[in-house]
Image (spheres, helix red, strand yellow):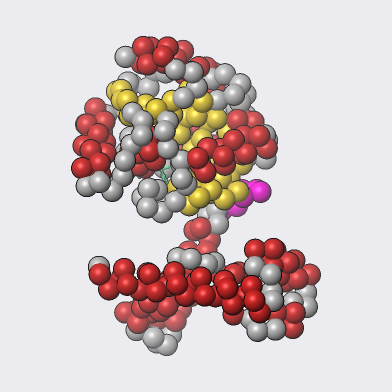
Amino acid sequence: SFGGCAAAVDYSYKLLYCGLIGRSWAMVFAGGGFRVKLYDIVQQQITSALEYISKYLLLEWFTLSSEVYYSCINWRISNAIYYYFLFQECTPEKLELKKKIFGQLDLIVSNDVILSSSTSTLLPTKLFTGLKHVKQCIVAHPVNPPYYVPLVELVPHPETEPSTVDKTHALMKKIGQSPVKLTKEIDGFVLNRLQYAVISEAWRLVGEGVISPADLDLVMSDGLGMRYAFIGPLETMHLNNQNPYDNYQFNLLFSLFQAMSEKTPADPEHLNARRAWRDECLMGLAKLKKQM
Ligand code: NAD
């Protein structure tokens, strides 16, 4: 039972809803060694979440180092919420529903529980403004499926405490995800802003008859996408540039260059070593693509 589980632990459970994203988070958290409790208002969702998790375990694509508990309640959180240290909300993308859930949690959580939303599009100011525990609130936006695509965007509310961001960041690292911190909220966060920039240029090029739809997709899947699996656009620029200083005339570009040089100093020895690493990664990826 909920009470029994909660009494046995201190701050080691994660609480989720178990749709597509909720069940995926459950696997990732449990794989990282945390005990997880799933909640949903639909019993069938619990059943199918557990079947889904067992399927991945059977395929040996994933191992759980901890347990997943489950429960079906009609959204009546008991006082046992005090024993959780992170609540990862994964309900449908409806602002009013999410606000209602965070409003209910706000009445009962202690001052150190992290209240996290998986939302893809809703801004923290829309979700959390006015909550008593707003300092503990954050958006942790995963990419589907999180156990293969590890990026998580952490987006704070303007009143979120830096320690909430840091604790969530550390937790995500611990479970093997790749968290990035946004310093402020922005529509689309970062992943979708980049994605839609690419999509809109793709539409333009195809719309203007520059390239066929199939070839446009090949540009990404057999061109840029290969590289971007290992290095981002900024590092690509850094590694491709023969005379980096020539192009770094403006302040922003210079600070970008400095940031990139911290990772790979812009001298031939370091640049060539990093290029060799990139090429080795690409060789591995090319082999894998041939096998698929
Ligand atoms: P989903 O529809 O698969 O799952 C939602 C779950 O919430 C269902 O199991 C549903 O029964 C349950 N639910 C509905 N109302 C509830 C309530 N009042 N109390 C408790 N449970 C309730 O949705 P999803 O695709 O898992 O998306 C969940 C969230 O994750 C959304 O905010 C979405 O934007 C975000 N997200 C989704 C993806 C994706 O690719 N699907 C990726 C990143 C983030």
State which image quarter holds ligand 1: top left
Q: Main secondary structure of the magenta part?
A: loop
Taking depth in this image into account, of 209 and 83 the one nearest to the observer is 83
- Write down the quadrant of residue 222 in the picture: bottom left
Outermost residue, bottom side? 210
Q: Quadrant of residue 125?
A: top right
Q: Which x, y percent locates residue 165?
A: 61, 39
Height in image: 32 above or below 185? above
Q: Is residue 85 left or right of residue 5?
A: right
228 or 132, nearer to the observer = 228
Magenta stretch holds residue 71: no
Tell me the quadrant of the picture where the N terminus can be found. Answer: top left
Q: Which span is picked out in magenta?
A: 182-187
- The answer to whether one can see residue 278 in this image is yes
Q: Residue at horizontal 66%, vertical 34%?
A: 163
| In the depicted structure, whether residue 217 falls above or below residue 210 | above
For the point 37% across and 69% down, which residue is it?
285
Q: Residue at x 52, y 37 (%)?
A: 171
Relative placement, left or right, of 100 versus 159 is left
Q: Is residue 78 above or below residue 222?
A: above
Q: Quadrant of residue 290?
A: bottom left
